[in-house]
Amino acid sequence: MIISRDPIIFSDLALSRRLERAEGRSNAEFVEARARLFPESGAEWIEVAGAYAMFDGVGSPLTQTFGLGVFEPVTPVEMEELEEFFRKRGADVHHEVSPLADASLLTLLNERGYQPIELTSVMYRPIGPGVQLASPRNEKVQSRLMREGEVELWAQTAAKGWSELTELADMILELSYITAKRPIGLSFLAELDGRPIATGAMLIHDGVALLAGASTIPEGRKQGAQLSLLESRLRYAAEKGCDIAMMCAAPGSASQRNAERQGFRIAYTRIKWSLK
């Protein structure tokens, strides 16, 4: 339950364009940060037919397109340009597509041999001044923006939250470091009795606050850290003029259920298409 009188925002093409561009812009910022910090990575992105095509390295979850078919129909020539962008870098060709994309895109994807490989729930909720979550909060946990000189602290805290994945430890630390170094990204820390226990990230674009980067260290879990980070980010976004908050999750996951408890609802389910 949410204490809110925010207006209803319907899930339509206009909303999809805002949400897809916010995520595309967030990932473009990440790719640009990687290119700046690690020039040898070859990270870059391009825009074709209104879609953002990202190369963040072979195998990176960001190496794909965002917004394909949402801003304008895609021609076979433009699709070939996108496919070549990935091919020449040795990467698989992936497009994550909104169901509100132009209907001609489905025909084009099928004609070119694409197969669906993944589903994502894209969720949103209206926000406004004074936004507040109804769920009780642990007052011992306080959330704030990362301060100057705390990039390493934020990255280490975020990576520690995924410490169970020991085989991916170096990659997760690098991803966290890059996230914290994005020029227009916003990195938040949750502290219990003054000790960092959780992280959350946010990027604002066109009145949309994209929430991501949720991580809690093992010994800090079940203390309400993510609830505190969510409320802090929503309030910050509302103060900056945002009217929508956005997040993504696997369909039916605990993350989706937790978001729905806090007033988020599913805008649509995206399909990731892979060229075989």
Image (cartoon, helix red, strand yellow):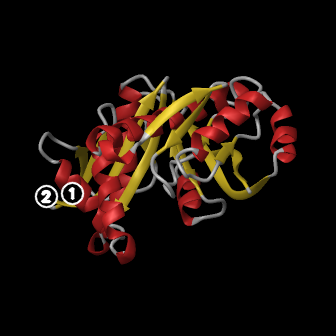
Image-based side of 127 in relation to 275, left or right: left
Query: Which picture quadrant has residue 97?
Result: top right
Front-most of residues 177 and 199: 177
Q: Amino acid at mark 1?
A: Glu
Residue assigned mark 1 = 191
Q: Is residue 146 left or right of residue 27?
A: left
Q: Secondary structure at mark 1?
A: strand
Q: Which quadrant would the C terminus be assigned to in this image?
A: bottom right
Location of residue 128 in the rendering, given as x and y in whole percent from the top left corner: 47, 29
**Could you say where residue 20 lies in the image, as x and y percent from the top left?**
60, 34
Q: Is residue 114 above or below residue 215?
A: above
Give the farthest residue toward the front.
88
Residue at left 73%, top 23%? 72
Above or below, comparing residue 138 to residue 235 in the picture: below
**Residue 103 visible here:** no
Identify which residue is drawn at 61% across, 59% down. 250
Q: Are marks 1 and 2 in contact (CB under 8 Å)?
A: yes
Q: Which residue is mark 2?
A: 194
Q: Is residue 58 above or below residue 47?
A: below
Mark 2 is on which residue type? Gly
Label 2, residues with CA under 10 Å away: few <14, some 14-19, many ≥20: few
* Quarter of the rendering containing residue 165: bottom left
Bin the neighbour count of mark 1 within 10 Å (Cα to Cα): few under 14, some 14-19, many 20 and up.
Answer: many
**Is residue 157 among what the camera can see?**
yes
Separation of residues labelled 1 and 2 (CA atoms): 5 Å
Image vertical order of residue 57 relative to residue 205, above or below: below
- x then y, percent, for residue 211: 45, 44
Q: x, y (%) of residue 121?
A: 64, 51
Say whether residue 80 is left or right of residue 235: right
Label 2's element? loop
